[in-house]
Amino acid sequence: MNAPWVKHYQPGVPAEIELPTESLVALVERSVREAGDSVATEFFGRTTTYEQLGEQISRAAEGLRRLGVQAGDRVAIVLPNSPQHVVAFYAILRLGAVVVEHNPLYTERELRHIFEDHTARVAICWDVAVPKLKAIPDDVPLRHIVSVNLLDAFPTIKRLALSLPVKSLRETRAKLTQPAPGTMTWKHLLGSGPLDDSYPRPTVTDLAVIQYTSGTTGVPKGAMLSHFNLYSNARQGEAWMYGAEYRKENFYAILPMFHAFGMTLFLTYGILKQGRLVIFPSFDVDLVLDAAKKSPPTVYCAVPPIYERTAVRAQERGISLKSAKYCISGAMNLPEAVVELWESVSGGLLVEGYGMTEASPVCLGNPFAPSRRPNTIGVPFPSTYMKVVDADDPTREVAQGERGELLIQGPQVFSGYWNMPEETAKTLLPDGWLRTGDLVTVDADGFTTIVDRVKELIITGGFNVSPSEVEAVLRGNTDVLDAAVVGVPSKHSGESVVAIVRLRPGAVLNAAGLIEFCRVQLAAYKVPRDIVAVDELPTSMLGKVLRKQVREDYLAGHAG
């Protein structure tokens, strides 16, 4: 297959990767053997070596086995970034079971729908989020909750400080941990001793992760990612970041590990490179810069607002970021002003990439070389191919330079959606090409520019928001007759969620009240930032609300 873009790769980057023949369990076990006493994780200054990481994975796997977890079972992880998250991920895989990642800030309603779909019987959950799981009705077969206290991974002195009877410290402690009666603690899970080394390991073709992604229908879909898919994408990342050294790189784990981008960067690629994962449960720019003084970041992958905030604050505090050599931005458009700002304080290039959950997730990227092209998402990764087709007829390729839908093929492409064969057939073509739903133009060298989306997903701060899901919540309010939710440009988050509502006769718009109504049922990033009332919503001949027109009308009314 013709791949003109390869000539623009950074020197040393291969056109093809060596495809994996082993599972992710073999990946982590190799890193444990080879890295030994090198630091695997750093959390608020406390470090864990690769040898210790391997021991904890074995103990957690044995604990899960005693809870009845077997090969093929789904096990839920409901955790922020933490050392326990790394251990849980690989302990589940060690048994041949399937990781299902969840945003711990999801509401009970959001979690319930996903649990109804994957039917995991065991969940490893941040103790603060346990009440939401306990609220899930008994018809969902969740039987065991393992509660995780993040403070257990803190350095002793910091953990003791947070127990002092000082109001501000009590408030901080309450944000990090809450009592979780009726659960098994993480400490107890690890107290069973190591797993018998002869216990069967998964194969490279086995299912490793079900990663949920918002669909245009408003129903989250579970993308099935195999060990082969995820290991391949880690190797593609390794090839792309040519020059990154084993046991020498500090990965700043800011992006959430429950998101496909963070999962691959830290849990697979970071462990593959035997790097130090400097872990943050959420992004706090001053905590990041405090850590940078001790363990300077070399791999710093984030979304544009984080780059901007980090660079500005580093300048204010006089902290050097010259160590940051490998910086990829994804999930939203990367403004040139942010690139210039970041590169003025860092030690390398900031390049834009592209991915989607269904591709483990990274597919394209700009080279870490002068050949990069701003305002594009770059070129296909090694062993990755693309073509551009008519969105209404994916069998017909469009002419070079013509606008069309981007299709992707490669070892990182998923096998389908969990329990959704019809949705799989719409997205994954019989010959293995993945329909991205993004409309692009591609120049003669393969550099790709996104111009629109076939899908109507809103991407805010790097997260996908289904308009249909937010609309369904709004229609549940007694004052709302109908709603249309759209994304509008935002300097800070790529897009902001905006709702246009049609009220019931006699109702008066209470935007603040509706926003609060949504906040109870939706994760914070899905909640509309603005709500506007109209007399009528534009519809098609079939009565379908025309979101594109709604968006245009809103922007016209808020111009300037």
Image: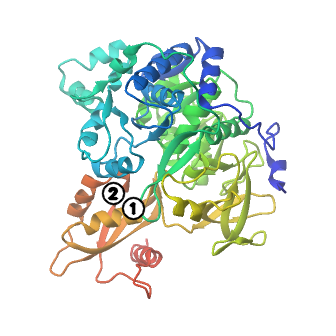
Q: Position of residue 56 (x, y in %)?
A: 47, 18
Of 341 and 487, the residue lying toward us: 487
Q: Quadrant of residue 264?
A: top right
Tell whether 85 sits left or right of 382.
left
Up/down of 391 relative to 386, above or below? below
Q: Quadrant of the N terminus?
A: bottom right
Residue named by callout 1: 497
What secondary structure is marked by label 2? Answer: loop
Mark 2 or 1 closer to N-term?
1
Looking at this view, is 138 or 310 the one in front?
138
- Give the CA separation, mark 2 to mark 1: 7 Å
Q: Quadrant of the C terminus?
A: bottom left
| In contact (CB < 8 Å): disc 2 and disc 1 | yes
Q: Is residue 72 left or right of residue 183?
A: right
Asked if one can make out residue 523 in the rendered structure from this viewpoint, the answer is no
For badge 2, the amino acid type reads: Val
Q: Residue 70: horizontal and vertical position, in percent? A: 46, 31
Q: How did the renderer colour the structure?
A: rainbow
Q: Residue at x 42, y 61 (%)?
A: 466
Residue 527: which numbered mark, if any? Answer: 2
Provide residue 259's location: percent of width, then percent of height.
Answer: 49, 43
Vertical placement of residue 96 versus 116, above or below = above
Q: Amino acid at mark 1?
A: Val
Residue at horizontal 55%, vertical 32%? Answer: 267
Tag 1's secondary structure? strand
